[in-house]
Image: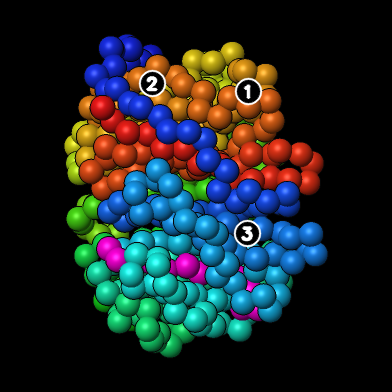
Amino acid sequence: MLLSWSAAAREAPARLQESFGPVLNLSGTPTFNFEFQTAVSDSNVYIVWSDTSSLDVTQVYLRRSSDQGKRFEPPLRLSNNTGPAYLPTVVAEGKKVYVAWREQGIQLRVSHDNGRNFEPAVTLAAHGDSPRLAAENSDVYVTWTVPTGMRSALQHFRASHDKGLTFGPTLALDDRPGIGVTELTASNNRVYLVGDDIGADDRPDVYVRTSPDEGKAFAPRLNLSADQGPGQPSLLARIAVKDQKVHVVWEECDDLFPETCAILYRRSTDRGASFGPTHAMSGNPGYAFAPDLEISGQHVFVAWQDDSPGNFDILLRTSDDHGATFSAPRNLSHSSGYSGAVSLSAAQSHLRVAWEDTTAGSVDIFYRASGDLGASFTPVTNLSNTPTRSSAPQVFASSGGSHGYLAWLEDLSNENTDVFFRRTEAR
């Protein structure tokens, strides 16, 4: 299925040219802003984050751009100011925008006019952490964890089929404690969850769970990493779904204090009912961490950080046949510093990659882009280029791919972190 590690792709002249907008400070407060998330729909760009004020009360804010990230409206506080508010998440579906967060339970606010106005907050659960959202057409799905001990939690789920106006009953998804959902997605009236669970060997495994009927009921969980053997922790699972095909990647180490870690991949061609064999994306002994996964049509992209080149660089593999075969790994960073925390965005023929890099001395956000599905890439660009620490990049794009957006955290001082943003546009 997979080509050899040594058949690395050669650099081709980039066939994409981009222009970059200015760096914008979206939070702009002298306090600690963190936990940001992003969404885009048509020309609207949404950023949500948590802000710890000088009174040590954490609030959730949203900023919206209606002109493809050129200008942003003032911050809008979404939280209720009834207690610490954090862990926000956002999805956009057409004119609908959904934001969930943790504040005395799980809260949700809904906008039906591209984020101009939001309905009052609705409490979906009295207790819970780490909400995840997915939306499709008039459906919106929310899942969260309810801790039951130091290392265990139960996963809960609710669904709305009227654009978030009302929600059905809460479903308890677990047949044992310990699962934590890392991603939730919806496609063709089906719901998919991926996460990890501490099993009998006290090591996390990667599980997938699916609902064939818009979240009314869920099939039993599938353990995707069980064949890797006992004692091997499986973490940081990512999922992507297109038509009947489900793709999952994760990080697999040989122990809790590992000597080697690999990036593994499995796919399903029957909407998650079964999965094919496990394949290693990384190929050499060493450390391969923190994968990201994106799809565009029949094209599948997997990127991660890997120390096999001699220091940590960003490696990428691509598939042009729905994940049946993959190219050899390609080194996108080629830097003398440490490269990590990679983020991918794929839309139409455009693929964008952002990561943290220490080559310039401090930690900066480095970036490359392709306009031909990864056949060629623009040169490496330092998009933050500041003396302070830039971290946690997220790259995303318009549905047509011509407009790209990047957000990250900028540590301006020991007590001041802000959410920064920059747009790109294909020329």
Give the image location of residue 412, x and y in percent: 71, 38
Q: Viewed as shown, does residue 394 lie left or right of 321?
A: right
**What's the mark number on residue 24?**
none
Type of the residue with mark 2: Arg
Mark 1 or 2: the one toward you: 1
Secondary element type, mark 1:
loop
Q: Quadrant of the C terminus?
A: top left
Type of the residue with mark 1: Thr
Q: Viewed as shown, does residue 217 lie left or right of 310?
A: left
**Badge 3 density bin: few <14, some 14–19, many ≥20, Cα 10 Å:** many
Give the image location of residue 82, x and y in percent: 68, 79
User: Which residue carries the number 1 mark?
Assistant: 358
Which residue is at the front of the view, 186 or 101? Answer: 101
User: Which residue carries the number 2 mark?
Assistant: 330
Point out the stretch of residues depicted in magenta.
Answer: 94-105
Specify how the rendered protein is coloured.
rainbow
Mark 3 or 2: the one toward you: 3
The numbered mark, 3 or 1, whose residue comes first in the sequence reads 3
Q: CA distance from mark 1 to mark 2?
A: 20 Å
Q: CA distance from mark 3 to mark 2?
A: 36 Å
Within the image, what quadrant is residue 93 found in?
Answer: bottom left
The numbered mark, 1 or 2, whose residue comes first in the sequence reads 2
**What's the mark number on residue 50?**
3
Query: Total label count?
Result: 3
Residue 394, compared with residue 101, is above or below; it is above
Check if residue 103 falls in the magenta segment.
yes
Type of the residue with mark 3: Ser
Check if residue 133 falls in the magenta segment.
no
Q: Residue at x 78, y 63 (%)?
A: 56
Q: Residue at x 32, y 77 (%)?
A: 163
CB atoms at circles 3 and 1 under 8 Å apart? no
Q: Residue at x 31, y 39 (%)?
A: 403
